[in-house]
Structure formats: C-alpha cells, structure tokens
Image: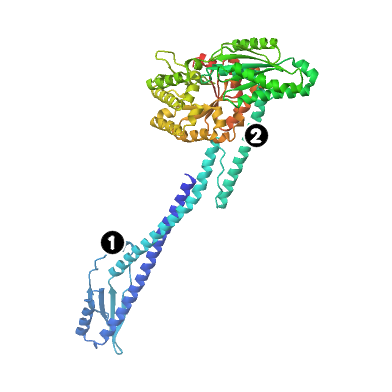
Amino acid sequence: MSLIGQIWLKLFVVIVLAFVGGVVVHTDAMRDTLQTQLQLKNADNATALAQVLSQQKGDEALMELALSAQFDTGFYRRIRFVGADGVQRFLREGRPQPLAAPRWFAQWLPIAAAPGVAQVSDGWRALGHVEVESQGSFAHDELWHAVQRGATAMLMLGLLAAAAGALMVGRIRRPLERAVEQAHSLERGEYVTVEEPPTPELRRLVSAMNSMVLRLEQVFEGQATQVETLRRQANCDALTGLSNRAHFMGQLDAALHREDGSAEGGLVLLRILDLAELNRSIGHDSADRMIAAIAQALQAYTTRADGCFVGRLNGSDFAICLPVGGVAEETARALCAALQAVLPAFGKQAAVAAGAVETVRATALAALMAQADLALARAEAKGAFAVETAGEPGTTLARLGEGGWRRRLHEALAAGRASLVEYPVRSRSGQLVHLECPLRVQLEPGGEPEPAARWLPLAGRAHLTAALDERALSLALGAITLDGQPRAVNLAIASLGDSGFAARVRAQLLQAPRAARLVWLEVPEAAAADQFELVRELARQLRPTGARVGLEHAGERIGRIERLFELGLDYVKLDASITRDIARDAARAGFVNGVVAMLHSLSVQVIAEGVAQAQDADALWQCGVDAQTGPFVSAQRG
C-alpha cells in the first residue's frame, strides 16, 4: 500500500475509533445518569407515598384507595404494600409502556433501578412498608434520543476531522507528487527542480532531490563539454576550426545521398599557391594567420545559407559545399576577389586559385572530386586568383521555373501522388526497430516519385512543407494500421514554424491511438539547435499520444545544444558524416562513444545513420549505439 494510502487508512481508523469510543462512553454515562435519577425518583416517590399512607391512621380502605390513585397515574410499573406482620396487603403491577427506542436498544442497554422503599407508621406504631418501582421505558426513550444527538455530534466532528485530515494529507501529497514527477523527469532525462515545501521532513527530501538534479545537470554539462571537445579533436582542423578532410568528405558524401538533402548544389576547392615558399618567406606565424584569415572568409558563407559547410582538406587546400545549384562559379570568383584584397597584406606572393563544380544528388563522391580537382589544377596553372569551372552551370529549378515547381507540387498533393519508401532500422540482434519512411512525391502524372531533395526547397518557399509532412504522417498511420510495423516520418524545419502544425499532428495521432504508439517523428538536429522552443513544444504536445520524438542527422551540434535534457527526446540518429569510416578513425570512434554515453545518460536511444560497411557496423556496436540503418543494414535479412 502506498504511503498516502497508509496515512488515509490510519486516519480512517483513528476517526472510527474516536467516533465509536465517544458514542460508547457517552451512552454509558447517560445510562448511569438516568439509572441513578430513576432510583432517586423511586426513593422519593416511596417516601412521599409513605407519608400519605401514614396519615390514614391505619385505615386499610383509605390506604388502598391512596395506593390505587397513585398507581393509576401511569408512571409506575409496580406498587406494593407489606404490613408490619410481613403479610402483603396491596400489590398493583402494570405492563411496561411501549418504547420509542428500538427493542434491541433496551435489551442491549438495560436500566435496572432499585425500587424505592419507605416505612409507613401511625405515630410510634409501625404499619408496614411501601415499595415503589417506576416505569423504565421513559428512561430508555430519553437514553435513545441522547445517543442519537451524541452520535450526530460525533459524526459531525468526525467529518470535520476527516476534512482537516484531507487538507493535511493534501499538503503532504503535493510535495511527494512533485518529488515523484521530478524522479520521472530524471528518468526521461529532464533536470527539473521543484519548490521546497514548508514541512521540515519533506523540505529535506525535496532539497536533497534538487541538489541531486543540479549535480546531475552539472555532470551532463560536463559530458556535453567533453563531447564537444572530442568532436573538435575528431572532426576539426586544429588551426582553423574547420572540418578536417575526413569529416568534410563524410559530410559531402552524406549530402550527395541524403533523401532530404539538396538535389543540386556546388563545390568550390580553394588552394593557397606555393604554401611552402610562403612559409619560408613570411614565416610560419604569418602563414598561420593568413590561413586563419582564409578560413574566416570561408566560414562567413556558412552563416548565410543553411546546409553550407566548409573544410580544410590539407595544409593548402580548402573546400566549401554550397546547398544550391548554379552559384558555384559565382561563389568562387567572389571568394577570390575578396581574398585578393586581403592576402597581399601577408606577403606579395600570397595568392589562391579556385576550382568550382556543380553537384547533383547521387553523384559518386570520387567522380565529383575528380572534376573539382581538374578545375582546380587548371586554375592553378593560370596563376594567382584564377577561377576555373567544371560541369554545366544552371539548375533544374532555373530551367523549369519556380512557378512550375510550385504548381506541380500543388497538383501532386491534390491528386494524392505521394508515397513512402521504407528503409529498415535494426537493433544489434537484427530485430526491426522501425521502418524509416521518407516521403516521395510524383511530380508528373505517371512519372517517377521524386525524393525530398528534388522538391523540398521549393516546398519551403511555397509554404507546403507542413501539408507534405501531414500527408506523410497520414500515410504512415495507414500503413501501421494494416501491418502493425513501427514507422518513422521526417518533419521539415519549416513545418515547425507553422503555429498550428503541432496541434494538427497531435489531432492526427489521437484519431489513431493504437497506430500512434508505433510512430516515430524526427526533426533535423539544426531545428533543435536553432529553434529549441519549437522542438520542445512539439515534443510536449505529442508525448501524451505515445508517439516518439527524436532528432535526425545529428552529431555536428549535439554537444552545443543548450538544455538538451529539456527537449524530452526519445531517440537521436547520428548523421552518416559522423559514422562514415569510423572503423578506421579512432578519434571519431571516441567522439561517438562520448555522444552515446551522454545521450544514454538522458535515457535517449541512439541510432546510427548511413552505415555502409560491415566493419563500420561492428565499430558502431562497440561504441554502444542501439540500432543502425543504411545500405549495409538494408542488405541484411531480418
């Protein structure tokens, strides 16, 4: 039995015992009082009747007449006169009067008062004695009414005591419930402190819980700091802070093959010309400052466009990946022009050359880098601040037109030309965790369903991402209802900005409560980093439905998300750029180990994305991930 239940039971027992004890004591005291009063009444009546009889001078007829008159008043059960010689001269007995009190009450609480006895005499001559016994039914009736009044009063007091007890129990229950909720919050990975109650014992408990929460929060923050340090060591160039070659190539490969990535983009390679000679002529310190200045100029581009990332491939080479197509050459020329105004300050020989190439989704990484390297080699041959381009400029968007894309998206939605593709996510034992289900849209009637990389940028401009995400959720709920398999649906960052989106998704899930418990909803890591409150509100609204909420493409900023523990996440998917070639990179494996440990401390499940090789899968299992997805996992049979 719970503590509150025990308190209520004890309070109930105390009130019942007090009620019963009070009624019993009150009843017994009243019975004794009434019995004593009846006995005194008998004695007084006997004395008064003896005086009347004494005045009759021994005339038996008159004495009998007086006795009969007294008996006929109806207040007596028996009147008896015994002469001086011991012979009974008069006896009158009446039947008991009817009771207003229950018969069982009179039997359970008998009132037995001794008869009143008085001597009758004529002067000094004794005539005998008279015995008087009053009716007891009046006493029983009075006792019954007194018990009723007493029981009612005790019941009212008991109810008042119960109400006061309820208030006291409530004052105890509320801090305990807050402490329990605080413990549940810790179980969910949320660090919540509560107000300390006035009760000393509970105040000590809550104070201890708050101290533990603050200490755990400090531990988590320490873990997050350590994870960020490991990330920098594994993924960043020590001098510039940009992504190192391995990490940049992983990011680029993931971007080229991601369902919801950009369909078209650009890649710019930048090379410092004759860096070795510069080191000799201007010195290592000046050369390092020049490299930092170039890195700063490149880093500025990442703040202008989401999805843009930069890396240092080696001592003299830098790369920038652009999220949109048709601007690679323009960006390369703008970079060279900007650096041409800055670099001469470090030395006359300081110069760069750039090669640009347009990218298309699903292009092989090796082929793309070969084109970019060729363009860079041609630019380097031309000399300082030269730019060369490989590939055809111009994007599909430019050829089709933004209006055409928007119209086709509207038509596809209206006609229901949308479907889900399914990729398995499996645990270490091979058990299916869920099916990852990105949405594909058939832009042309009878055409091939297109991945999100093709239409998502235009859907964002047309404010259609929320409608597309809701369609994806509807398709997932329908499929779950048919086969009972859990499914994950991606939600776009732009959808979170729709003020009614979370409420509509919640309504969809509540309409299918069984299927909702098998739905996994995920938003990009960038949403949690840049729109923290929106993601937290989404998780708060959807938690009662039973659906799980998580982050996808995570790892780059996971250690820098403040108050990550407040999001209430169920799972996190590590980006393919983090998991790629992890078997051959001990620093990256250490980073993943740290991320997994940090997330597990928040009771968050960790899933690795984009696993393409068996050795990477083994390394990720050793790092402690809970599940994996990617080409290697899809090729395995469950």
* Amino acid type, residue under disc 1 in the picture: Pro
Is any atom of residue 239 visible in this view? no
The quarter of the picture where residue 241 lies is: top right
Q: CA distance from mark 2 to mark 1?
A: 78 Å
Disc sitting over residue 608 in the figure? none
Question: x and y percent of residue 185 in the render?
Answer: 53, 38
Query: Can residue 329 be seen from the camera position used here?
Result: yes
| Residue to which mark 2 is pinned | 222
Disc 2 residue type?
Gly
Q: Nearer the viewer, mark 2 or mark 1?
A: 2
Residue toward you, 39 or 623:
623
Foreground pick, 229 / 5: 229
Ranked by sequence position, the earlier of labels 2 and 1 is 1
Where on the picture, by quarter, is residue 293?
top right
Residue 12 lies left or right of residue 276; in this view the side is left
48 vs 465, nearest the viewer:
465
The spot of residue 287 in percent (x, y) is 76, 21
User: Residue 31: x, y in percent?
Assistant: 36, 67
Q: Secondary structure at mark 1?
A: loop
Query: What label sits on residue 102 in the rendered view?
Result: 1
Q: How many marks?
A: 2
From the viewer's perspective, is 4 left or right of 206? Answer: left
Q: Label 2, secondary structure: give it.
A: helix
